[in-house]
Image: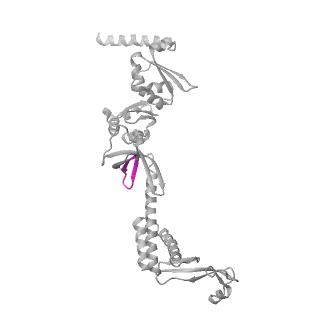
Amino acid sequence: MSNQLFDAIEMLAVEKGINKEVLLEALEAALISAYKKNFKSATNVRVDLDEQQGKMRVYSRKNVVDDVMDHQQEISLEEAKKIDPNYELEDVIEVEVTPKDFGRIAAQAAKQVVTQRVREAERGVIYEEYVDREEDVMTGIVQRKDPRFIYVDLGKIEAKLPEQEQIPTETYNIHDRIKVLVTKVENTSKGPQIFISRSHPGLLKRLFEMEVPEIYDGTVEIKSVAREAGDRSKIAVYAENPEVDPVGSCVGQKGQRVQAVVNELKGEKIDIVEWSEDPTVYVSNALSPSKVVEVIVNEEEKATTVIVPDYQLSLAIGKRGQNARLAAKLTGWKIDIKSETEAKNEGILHAETIFAEDELVEEKSDSFGDLFE
C-alpha cells in the first residue's frame, strides 16, 4: 500500500507541476495529526517516510528525565539506558509506535491532504499567471450574469465585470466575446479573484497599443486619456521625432486603426489630439473639433480662459458640456470657454488678436480670390 501511495504522489506532482517535497511534507503533517486523532495520543511523534523501501514509520519522542511526571512525554534515565547505554539526561529518545493498520489511516490522510494541496497549488499557479496581467487587455467570453456582475471566462478562471465597470450603452449576452482590461487580481481564501473593466481609460490606451505599431514600439507616446465610456473619449499623443505624425499614426490609412478601436468599443467616438508642453497649444488641441481664437493661461491656478468664434461656442462646450469636460480632464487644466463677443464685451480679448484675425480674413479672401481669377 505504501509503495502505491508514494508512486501516486510522484505521478501527481509531475502532472500538476507541484514540488513533490511539498506534498510529502504535507502528508507527514497529516499522518501525525491522523495518528494522534485515531489513537487518542498527545505524544510528541515523528513520521518517517522512506520512499526507497516504501515504508512509513511512526516514532514517539520522549525526553530523558530523572523523575517521570508524564509517561507519554517522558522516560526515565534507567529505562532509556536499557534501550541504549549512551543516553543521558535531557536527551530525546525515539521509540517506534507504528500501528499495524497504519497503511489504511495513511491512505485516508493522504487523500485529504493531497487533494487540498493540489487545490492550493492550482490556485497559486492561476494567481501567479494572472497577477502579471494587471492593466493588460484580455479576450474573454461572457458566461453568465447577475444583478451585480457579468462573469467572463478568461481561460483558466472566471473574472468579474462589476456593473460600474460596464459600458452603459452596451448589452452583454451569453457567449459574447469581449475585450476587457484586468484591473485587479486578488488572492483570497476562496482562490484568485480577478476584476475586469470595459469602461476604464486604460482599456482605450491598451487597445491603441494593440492597433498602432508606433505606440507599441515607443515611437508615439500616449500622454493622457479622458473617457466617458460608451459615448466619447479624447486621447493625447506625442512623438519626439518631428518627422512622425502622432495623430496620423493613430488614425491610420483611411482611419482604419482608430476605426478598429471604435468598433471594439461599439461606436464610442474618439478624438485624437496632439500633446504639447505649451498649455496654450495643448488646450487648443484638446478642444478639437472646435476652433480656438485665443487661450489665456493662469499658471498659478492652473486655469485657462479659452476664446472661440461665436458660431463655435456650442461645439467647443459640447453636448451637456461634454467636450469642455473631457478637454479639462485630458489636459489637467481648468477651462473656461467664452465666445468672441463675450470676450470683447468683458475686455479680455486682446486688440492685437482682433487685428490679426481681420488680417487673416483679408489674406484668406485674397488667396481664395486668386484661385478664381
Residue at (40% x, 21% y) in the render: 314
Q: Identify the residue at horizontal 42%, vertical 23% (top origin).
A: 317
Residue 145 location in percent, x, y? 35, 48
Magenta stretch, main secondary structure, is strand
Q: Is residue 288 visible?
A: no
| Residue 151 among magenta residues | yes
Position above or below: 301 against 345 = below
Q: Position of residue 177 (x, y in %)?
A: 32, 47
Residue nearest the viewer, comparing 193 with 25: 193
**Quadrant showing the C terminus:** top left
Seen at 32% across and 10% down, the residue is: 369
The image position of residue 226, as x and y in percent, is 44, 34
Viewer-side residue, 372 vs 311:
311
What colour scheme was applied to this rendering of the protein?
A: one colour
Q: Which of the 4 quarters of the picture holds residue 326?
A: top left
Start-end of magenta stretch? 148-160
Is 198 within the magenta? no
Please say if 141 is above or below 324: below
- In percent of width and height, residue 172 lies at 33, 44
